[in-house]
Amino acid sequence: KEYGCQTPESRYWMGAAAANGSARATGLFGSAYLALPPILDIKKSIAYFTKAMRLGLADSAMMLEGIHSPDVSTAKQFPEYKNCKSSIYYMTLRVKMFAGNMQDVAVSASLMMKGNNEIYPEVCLTRKEYEDTVREAEQEFERIKADMLAKKEKHDALYAKAQPMFAEMRAAFAAQAK
C-alpha cells in the first residue's frame, strides 16, 4: 500500500497492461494470486502464469515448473498440482527460454524415472512420457518464439515510422520546458 501497488488505480493500470498483452503485467497478476492473501487463488495464478509464459515471460515458466514440481522440498506447498510430466514440460520451456542447458532437464527426468532418491522418492515418469513431453514443450517454445518475432517486427515497423518525428518532438518539448 505504501507504494501504491494495492490501490484501485494501480490495479486498473496493471489490469489494462495485462489485457493489452504485457507479459510482465500478466506475470505480476500470477504472482499476486499466488502470494497475496486474501486473494490467494492457485488456479488463477496458473492461468496468468501460463498466459505470461506464452507471451514470452520466461520467469512464468519457472513459476509453473515450481508449482508442478514433485520435488519433495517444494511439493508440500501445492500437493494437488505436483506432476512430473508438467514439471518437465515447464522445465523444458524455462531452459529453452533462458537459453540454458537441456542436460539439466535430462538429469531431472532421469531422477524422476528412477525414483528412490532424496529428491524424487517415487518413480513418476517413463522414458516415453519424458520424450513426448519434451517434444511438446519444444513445439510450444517454437510457437512462443514465432509470436514474439512477429510482435517485434510490428514494433520495429511502428518505431521506424515514428522515428523521423522524434527530433521535432524533443525540440518542442524542450522549448515548452523552458
Image: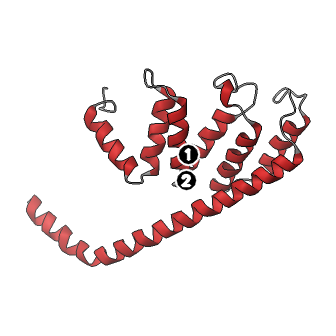
- Rendered position, 86 above or below 72: below
Residue wearing tag 1: 50
Q: Disc 1 to disc 2, how far (Cα)?
A: 6 Å
- Amino acid type, callout 2: Arg
- Residue name at image x 51 percent, y 54 percent: 55
For label 2, the residue is 54
Circle 2 sits in a helix, a strand or a loop, which is it? Answer: helix
Where residue 177 appears, as percent x and y from the top left, is: 11, 59
Name the image quarter holding the C terminus. Answer: bottom left
* Residue found 54% across the figure and 33% down from its top: 43
Question: Residue at point 60% right, 62% down?
Answer: 143
Q: For residue 172, what is the image quadrant?
A: bottom left
Residue 96 versus residue 169 in the image, above or below: above
On screen, residue 84 versus residue 19, left or right, reads right
Position of 142 compared to 4: left or right? right
36 or 20: which is nearer to us?
Answer: 20
Q: Amino acid type of disc 1?
A: Thr
Q: Is residue 163 left or right of residue 54?
A: left
Q: Quadrant of residue 111?
A: top right
Dot 1 falls on a residue whose secondary structure is helix
**In this view of the protein, which residue sits in the foreground, 72 or 162?**
72
Relative side of 104 to 93, left or right: right
Q: Is residue 127 shown to the viewer in this render?
A: yes
The spot of residue 173 in percent (x, y) is 15, 64
Across and down, in percent, residue 76 comes to 68, 22
Residue 99: % across, % down: 67, 57
